[in-house]
Amino acid sequence: MAIARHRFDALLRGAAFALGTVWAAVATAAPPEIAADKTKLDNGLEVILHEDHRTPIVTVNVWYHVGSKDEPAGKNGFAHLFEHLMFQGSKHVPEDAYFRMLERAGASDINGSTNTDRTNYFETVPPNQLELALWLESDRMGFLLEHVDQLTFAGQRDVVKNERRQRYENAPYGLALLHIREHLFPKAHPYNLLTIGTPQDLDAANLDDVKAFFRQWYVPSNASLVIAGDIDKTKAKALVDKYFGPLRGARTPPRRPVPDVRLTGQTRLEMSAQVELGRVYVSWPTPAFFTSADAELDMAAHVLSSGKTSRLYKRLVYDLQIAQDVSAYQGSLQLGSVFEIVATAAPGHTPDELLKVIDEEVAKLQAAPPDDAELQRAKTSVRAQAVFELERDASRADKLNQYNHFTGDPGYLAKDLEAHERVTLAQVKDAATKYLPLGKRVVTVVTPNKAAPVCGRLDKVLP
């Protein structure tokens, strides 16, 4: 056993050296950037153009600045429902023809997604099919409601309900996130409910409700359009003017008020699930995306769990061998983020064993800053990930829209990386102390139980 462990140590050192060589090159390279021009149409649509001729493709990426945080009470799931409805057809596009038209034109990466803060749609096409992609996007932005009828609405509502069953109700540990959100954010907070929607609200929805939601939020003045890739910016802008310029803008309604998120103590959620291995989630509310503390907590998460030599992985998985996996991350969001540590127990071990070690490692980080090598590895990892993301045209397009949505500056990449580079050893310690208090958090323990549903059952809520 000692020989096997010695060999594994050698493999780890060799892998770390090889990876370190690659990442060192990334760390010393010039700061990456995504050059883009941003303008605004008279109807309020933001247009961001990124010209790059290295690959003969173009990505069209639209972000609507609406997510589940903008849903009124009793309408949970509307934003996600529209992600589905937008692909079903519009005034000039027949039912179920959207994907077919793009695929025949050689498109790829045709999809959309919804989260708490935004809804996006994207496709990558050959340069000579850019006009088709823009026409399709403009038609559903301007004329979706002239196609959506009761049959389309009811069908996609059933699809969304089925997606909830697959991803949450029939998935191992699937309802843990739901219960964590309910106890981490107060009931009036826009993040209290999941984006997927509740069956009750979806069943209670009617076609008029859905149309009203669309008219409020899916308007040019509440959207940003990125065109990235092998384009001529002048010609691309002319096509945008042609297809989006005539659409009417509208004033969006005021956003929901956001109550303070202040935990006064620890809440322990005890769940049971029909799973083989126990799991523990440790969750804290933390500052919003792109604040200084957001970058500091990113660094703390990397120190705790990024790579096989990280503190939590080394102790839980490698040294003690009581966990199958562990991750820590700063889940950055617009109105406030979530720092979460998740660990799955190895066979024969319990979630509380993992929690004890997690608490020890968080306490160590609060007592003393990480060493310089740990922080440098974290910074190099952040920079390397940013560089690798820029390789794909679709990733660059989405990153431009992400920065525009959250900061108003699509070229924010350099500032984002600079914010992470500025983080000091003391700031990592101070952020862990201030934002990850062991006595103010939500701890969720999932224990295997063959009589419980696979998604998990909430058995107890303990203060």
Image (tube, helix red, strand yellow):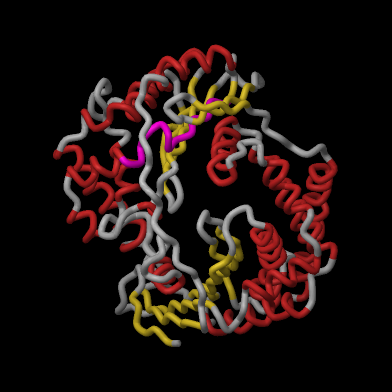
- Tell me the residue at 33%/76% (across/down): 457
Question: Based on the displayed image, in which of its 4 quarters is residue 303 positioned?
Answer: bottom right
Q: Residue furthest bottom?
A: 463
Residue 373 x, y percent position in the rendering: 84, 62
Q: Quadrant of residue 309?
A: bottom right
Residue 97: x %, y % from top left: 28, 25
**Looking at the image, residue 214 lies above or below residue 180:** above
Task: Locate residue 292 relative to residue 240 in the image: left or right.
Answer: right
User: Quarter of the image holding residue 249?
Assistant: top left
Query: Is 377 contained in the magenta span?
Result: no
How far across and down, in percent of the image, does residue 401 sit? 54, 37
Q: Position of residue 38 (x, y in %)?
A: 59, 28
Stretch in magenta: 216-228
Could you tell whether 59 is left or right of 449 in the image? right
Residue 250 vs residue 392, the one in the foreground? 250
Asked if residue 227 is among those painted magenta in the image, a careful observer would answer: yes
Q: Is residue 128 left or right of residue 395?
A: left
The quadrant of the image that shows the N terminus is bottom right
324 to the left or right of 91: right
